Each structure stands twice: as structure tokens, then as C-alpha cells.
Amino acid sequence: MSEYFIIYIEIERKIDFYYQMQHIETQFELRMTMDEIISERNQFKLQHVYDISHKPFSFGGGILYLHTNQGVFSYKIQDNPATFIHAFKSLKTEN
């Protein structure tokens, strides 16, 4: 298996010099290898990830949820995560 990834978006809200709300979107990769899932801020061993679920939005995109031994982590995504989720489930059944 090669490495799988999906792009997720973090939105930072800041008040600028003129007291206007600014929304800054930054894209990151959520990468999955044979052993772990890695985000910009977290790293999870695959055996500590119990499930991955997805909540789609009606206007496109959605939230990808990683259910781990440390809690549930959410990632805002724009792409269909079916390939990523399928790869995860395949890896979990192999182990």
C-alpha cells in the first residue's frame, strides 16, 4: 500500500487593526501510512484509531471524524473521503 491522504482545512478567525473579523483558511494533509495517521497537529498509531466517519454538508464538503483512544478529532474537508475511509478499513482488517 502506498500512502493515502486527504486535504483538510483549518479556519482561523482574527480581528484586524480596524476591528474587522478576518477568516484565514489554511489547507493541510491528513496522511495515512501502514502504521499511523498524521495531521498537522496530531499523530495517531493506527491501532489507536477505532473508526473514521464522515458527515457531509448539503452545500458540499463535510467533516471527517477520527475516533481514537484520545477522543474524537474532526477535520473540515472538501473532497469525498470514500477512498481514504475504505483504505483505513482495509488496513484495520489486515491487522
Image (spheres, rainbow, N blue to C red):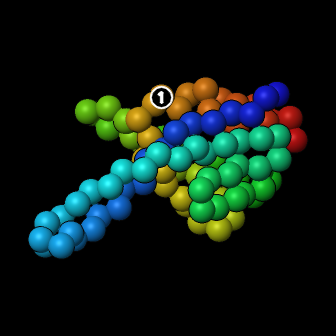
Can you give x and y, in whole percent of width and height, for residue 2 in the image?
A: 79, 29
Q: How many marks?
A: 1
Front residue of 37/24: it is 24
Left or right of 41, for residue 20: left
Residue 43 makes an appearance in the image: yes
Looking at this view, name the residue that lies furthest to the front.
Answer: 17
Q: Nearer the viewer, residue 93 or 87?
A: 87
- From the viewer's side, name the closer residue of 14 and 3: 14
- Label 1 element class: loop
Residue at 71%, 42% in the rendered image: 32
Q: As rendered, which of 26 and 68 lies closer to the eye?
A: 26
- Look at label 1 and name its amino acid: Asn
Pointer 1: what residue?
A: 80
Q: Is residue 95 above or below residue 42?
A: above
Query: Looking at the picture, how far across and down is residue 79, in whole percent?
Result: 45, 31
Q: Is residue 60 left or right of residue 5?
A: left
For residue 67, which quarter of the picture?
A: bottom right
Image: 18 above or below 24: below
Residue 5 percent coordinates (x, y)? 63, 36
Residue at x 43% of width, y 50% of height? 26
Q: Is residue 58 left or right of residue 82?
A: left
Q: Residue at x 27, y 33 (%)?
A: 58
Question: Alpha-carbon neighbours of circle 1 within 10 Å: few (<14), some, or many (≥20)?
Answer: some
Going 22% across and 71% down the picture, which residue do you hit?
Answer: 15
Task: State which quarter of the image contains the C terminus.
Answer: top right
